[in-house]
Amino acid sequence: MYKKNTPPFNKSLAVFILIPCIIIIIVLLIHYQSVARENAKVTEGIQALTTLETRDLYTMEEKIDYMKRKAIDSGDYSALFGNAVVFGDSIAEGLGLYGFLSPTSLVAVMGKSTENSLEDVPSLVNLAPRSVFFELGLNDISHPDSTLDSYLSHYEKIIDAVRLQLPNTQIYLCSIFPVTDETLKEKPEFSQIETYNTALAEMAKRKNIHYIDTYTFLKNNPQYHEQDGIHVIREFYPIWMDTLVNNSDLKNLL
């Protein structure tokens, strides 16, 4: 019977092959452990960064809230209205002229009415406030061609334009300010103010908008009017600002 010859086992060759394999395995294990340690460090770093970021953000929000509370106590309304805008006519313009609000919190021009204020909506949109307070009406009433229906129609167009472009902005409508009794005698058209305000309040309710009574206090305290019986003196503006704050979401910052 034929017997197959088995070649002798070459130990040197086996060792020559085995050693590189062992080296490769060791290198792979070291690399894996290194990668695992790096991943652990990255994960730990992300967690630490997230914790630090959250802590710093919370601290910053606390500081901002404190600054706003301090600001309102000292009469610095520009800080409190940092994310709010007052949109109106020359009365609103006085907030900037007397230094109560910064330009980034105002869209107000002398002579503005609801009829010509739609053109100013882009300026408001660019500011992207969280809250906007509208103060319009005296110039509408004084215009001979203006009617209550046209006033409401123009106002609604302004509101709809703002809602379309700033859907998350809270809208507040201020009632039309009163004039003095002496001015009423000279300009009887202003006797319509209360009628306009009633319609304005109804429109606000219909459109689910906040209405703020800025009429009653000044009506009962005419000493805050300028000599023309229409505009207001500097001392009235903090009272108006407090009224806006206390009847809006801004009161949550106090």
Image (spheres, rainbow, N blue to C red):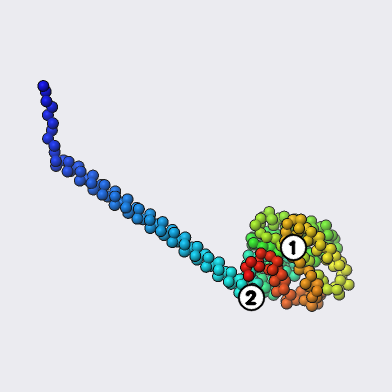
Residue 156 in picture, x, y percent from top left: 76, 56
Q: Is residue 153 left or right of residue 32?
A: right
Q: CA distance from mark 2 to mark 1?
A: 25 Å
Sequence-wise first label, 2 or 1: 2
Q: Nearer the viewer, residue 170 or 98?
A: 170
| Mark 2 neighbour density, 10 Å: few (under 14) some (14–19) many (20 or more) | few
**What's the amino acid at mark 2?**
Asp
**Residue 243 occupies which quadrant of the picture?**
bottom right
Question: Where, quadrant-wise, is the C terminus in this rendering?
Answer: bottom right
Q: Residue at x 67, y 73 (%)?
A: 100
Residue 154 in picture, x, y percent from top left: 78, 57
**Residue 138 occupies which quadrant of the picture?**
bottom right
Q: Residue at x 57, y 69 (%)?
A: 64
Mark 2: secondary structure? helix
Q: Residue at x 72, y 59 (%)?
A: 209
Q: Nearer the viewer, residue 191 or 48?
A: 48
User: On residue 199, which mark appears?
Assistant: none
Residue 107 in picture, x, y percent from top left: 69, 65
Mark 1: secondary structure? strand
Q: Is residue 234 left or right of residue 18?
A: right
Work out which residue is located at the far top of the displayed protein and give it.
1
Name the residue beneath numbered marker 2.
Answer: 73
Name the residue beneath numbered marker 1.
Answer: 211
Residue 235 in picture, x, y percent from top left: 73, 77
Give yes or no for contact between labels 2 and 1 (Cβ–Cβ under 8 Å): no
Q: Against 103, is 159 above or below?
A: above
**Residue 230 occupies which quadrant of the picture?**
bottom right
Q: Is residue 22 left or right of residue 187?
A: left
Residue 230 visible in rendering: no
